[in-house]
Amino acid sequence: MKFKSLIINGLAVAAATVAFTMPASATKSINLTGISGYPPAATWIGAFIDVYMPSVNTELAKTGNYKINWNKGVSGTIVKPRGELDGIGSGLGDLGVVVTAFHADKVPLYDVAFKTPFTTMDLGLAVATTGKMESMFDAYGKTWDTFNQVNLGPSGAVDNYMLWSKTKITKLSDIKGRKVGAAGPNLPWVIAAGAAGVQTNLADAYNSLSTGIYDNMIVWRQAAGAFKLCEPAPFVIDASLGAVNGFSLNVNKDVWAGLPGEVKNALKAAIPAWQKESVDRVNKGAAGGLARCKKDFGTEYTKMSDSDIKAWAAMLPPLAKNWAAAQDKNGLPGTAILKAWMDEMRAKNQPVMRDWDVK
């Protein structure tokens, strides 16, 4: 009996020791690949890698139940610029940042800021208002569902579009007849001023400006400095064209369905940190980008006259109302979104140069 009792007691002690030394539950690793055709020099991707991913890690570390093994598939290693939408939808990547500005035909509701230029130069407001529109109108989420994606939140990289050129521009009439590179939604702005618009993107811009595919480009200060676009185009004119949203951080819908709730919550909880860092990098980089251009490439800055800015805004066709009508025709709440957007801008006392929901 004593021998049996000793065995039982020994097993109990051993079991207690194992229970004490082993974790209550092992951390489960989940592999996620984040994709973008752009490098970390792009503010939205730098913020994605440096802040968003660590923020998700921090959130998950609170319980220790899950850990993300991140594969950073950026800089064109998995998809090229403009390829993020298809790449996330098809599963080439698990999540990534879609440049909505390049897909106005597919995700048209994100285009409202591009249809209302000369309205705000507050990037944080543009991003927050886009998020508010997503909450107010479920058509945003339904649109992403069509492309097998779940959107977590918007962001932006443009505090104020400016026109950068190989030769000096001092007034509105100087734009006429020029070849101007721009993202698709920007093209109507310069076409209305008499320019020939050429669709382009940041990844191609330096070579295009250097080789003369176009001699002018609509771009913001931070990007001009970061991508050295002011080297081939050292003259810039500021017409207060304004800020826009332009990105959505999305997850493949099938991947999303298979993630534990805690991981989903962590991916969503890290969105404000990504948005704030993206906006902060743009705002801090704006002055730095222009300073770099002036110091390294002799950039000359010109502010367009108020009268020319007003004239430019007035000469544009009713971009926003036409856009809203087209969305309404397709069963989307274009007119309601446009009014809500402009109401928000007016309520925040923005320098609205034209009431786009009216004319």
Image (cartoon, rainbow, N blue to C red):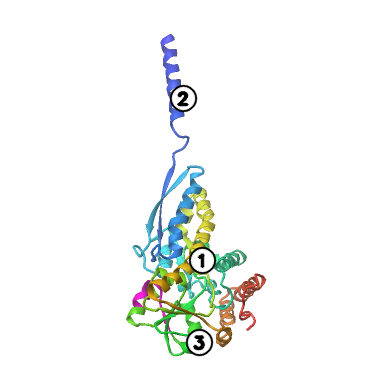
In the displayed structure, would residue 151 be above or below residue 343? above
Q: Secondary structure at mark 1?
A: helix
- Mark on residue 283? 1
Residue placed most toward the observer, 99 or 193? 193
Q: Secondary structure at mark 3?
A: loop
Report if the CB atoms under discs 1 and 2 are less than 8 Å apart: no
Q: Nearer the viewer, residue 190 or 121?
A: 121
Residue 67 in magenta?
A: no
Q: Position of residue 104 (x, y in %)?
A: 49, 74
- Do we see residue 145 in this rendering? no
Q: CA distance from mark 1 to mark 2?
A: 57 Å
Residue bearing the label numbered 3: 171
Q: Position of residue 279 (x, y in %)?
A: 51, 64
Viewer-nearest residue: 310 or 325: 310
Q: Which kind of residue does numbered mark 2 sit on?
A: Ala
Mark before the other along the chain sequence, 3 or 1: 3
Could you tell me which quadrant the N terminus lies in?
top left
Quarter of the image for residue 329 reads bottom right
In this rendering, the label closer to the viewer, 1 or 2: 1
| Residue ID for mark 2 | 16
Q: Is residue 302 above or below residue 272?
A: below
Check disc 1: other Cα within 10 Å, few if <14, some if 14-19, many if 20+: many
Image location (x, y in percent) of residue 290: 45, 72
**Local crowd size for mark 3, using a 10 Å CA cut-off: few (<14), some (14–19), many (≥20):** some
Q: CA distance from mark 3 to mark 1?
A: 26 Å
Pointer 1 or 2: first along the chain = 2
In the orientation shown, which residue stands out farthest toward the right? Answer: 347
Q: In the image, which residues are magenta?
A: 197-208
Point 46% across, 37% down: residue: 25
